[in-house]
Amino acid sequence: MGKPLKILLVSPEIQPFAKTGGLADMCASLAKSLHSLGHDVRLFMPKYKQADEKKFSLQSLPVKLSIPVGEKNIAGEIFSGKLEDGAPVYFLGNDFYFNRNSLYGDEDEVFTDNAERFIFFCRAVLEFCKSLAFQPDVVHCNEWQCGLIPVYLKTLYSHDAFYKSARTVFSIHNLGYQGNFKAETLDIARLPEEVFTPEKAEYYGEFSFLKAALVYSDSLTTVSPSYSKEILTKEYGFGMEGVLKKRENDLHGILNGVDYLEWSPEKDPLIAKTYEPSDLDGKEACRSALLKRFSSTSGNKQPVLCMVSRLSYQKGVDLVIEALPSLLKTGLKFVVLGIGEHRYENELQKLSVRYPGNCLCLFKFDERLAHEIIAGSDMILIPSRYEPCGLTQIYGMKYGTIPIGRAVGGLKDSIEEFDLKTGQGTGFKFDAFDLDAFLAAIKRALSAFKNQKSWNRLTLNGMQRDFSWNQSALAYVRLYENLLNK
Ligand code: ADP
């Protein structure tokens, strides 16, 4: 290994402290891998209500920050904790901004002060590192909430000797979330006028955290090779394709790994019975445990399909709702675990009333249930409109739960279409975002399910694939080193 690097990994969510999606898993597992490679990685996130001091044994540090936000100076406290492998995690506390029931908004509405909350966050992390005398080589920022960190470093902090050699990496996890706010945000952030131009942070008259990050960061990454190409097109670029095209040479697609310490059927404490490729009895026990949750035991030999997902437009929940009546009529079972848009919850709820023994809806965010459902199902549906990486298809493969996903982004990169003749492949993919293509992929899966030998082969193919972080973490290290050597 080269010289150990000092890496500051900043994210609005980190597993297990607070999570709404794959971003939290990615940050925690990348940090653990970097830590195990011998790098000095420190993490930074807001201290939300979910990041409970007692539950996570957080310590209050004797640091008092005072961060300019608009006309005010906002006080920030710092707490420290650890990932289970020992990597330090620092939390920015301010009850008014972060002690809320959810991370970014309530119900279908985002918080109206999100710009202020994350301006405070972005500037506070830079002040905190100085007070800690932790001088990072690389500041790795994630999602729009961290988008102003590279901007501050190249403007207000550009002459600050402390950050003279720091380089910034910005990871795009989902271009659908951009942090676009009214133009006055520039003043609240106390950034100079030069930042607010169409070449920089201005996006159709608004101030965009994401666009600013895409312009000001030294290097950009996204979470799969396919998504890194898709986002250069109008179809998937969410209006950012122009600015991304200009940064094409600095944009890298690195497929997310998964944390097999958390997600392995061999040692998962959250499932009914552990299992492994050479002994699948436990999978049957997990399946039986899941089936008990349905209101009827008839049809228990039928395939069990699941979805563990945010219920959002991106995830193609509408396609699942369209497909379900014809599928449920065949007697198969379907379970969904998810929270999100009410329109989808309502439609899914109606289906569970119409097919009570076959359709089970669990509208909550529950880590244990996610494990139970992924272990107990036969197939997992991920018919996303777009998918930067996606993790549940990878968890599915590891648990012998066959993914059926749309061939976009990380789904395209991680699922290999199963070939009945050769026995190669790990799942089923479809191209067009339409009902026929989706149902055709499900049909291929259902016919493979009928053939015990093929199904076993398919199951084992997926369970034996390796999506651990080792390779991906090394790719990030190479990227950091290249940046520092530039
Ligand atoms: P995204 O980040 O776009 O939401 P990913 O597939 O990358 O999608 O990651 C989703 C993560 O969130 C996975 O770890 C999945 O298990 C988890 N997850 C999604 N919904 C729920 C839920 N309702 N309860 C528990 N975990 C969930």
Image: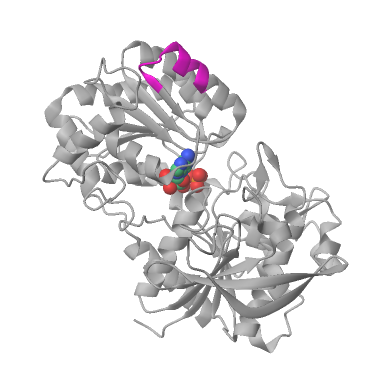
Q: Please, which colouring scheme is shown?
A: one colour
Image position, residue 381 (x, y; %): 39, 32
In the rendered view, would you say 325 is above or below 199? above
Residue 399 lies within the magenta run: no
Image position, residue 24 (x, y; %): 49, 55
**Residue 460 visible in image:** yes
| Quadrant in the picture for the C terminus | bottom right
| Quadrant in the picture for the N terminus | bottom left
- Residue 213 is left or right of residue 292, and the answer is right
User: What residue is rendered at 50% in x and 37% in y?
Assistant: 364
Residue 349 lies within the magenta run: yes
In the rendered view, would you say 58 is above or below 128? above
Total tally of numbered discs in the picture = 0
User: What residue is rendered at 32% in x and 51% in y?
Assistant: 263
**Residue placed most toward the observer, 181 or 248:** 181
Image position, residue 79 (x, y; %): 58, 71
Region in magenta: 348-359
- Residue 403 is left or right of residue 338, and the answer is left
In the rendered view, would you say 135 is above or below 323? below
Q: Which image quarter: residue 373?
A: top left
Q: Which image quarter: residue 34?
A: bottom left
In the rendered view, would you say 383 is above or below 86? above
**Residue 389 visible in image:** no
**Residue placed most toward the observer, 17 or 123:** 17
User: What residue is rendered at 75% in x and 71% in y?
Assistant: 75
User: What residue is rendered at 41% in x and 24% in y?
Assistant: 360
Q: Residue furthest bottom?
A: 161
Q: Residue furthest front?
A: 54
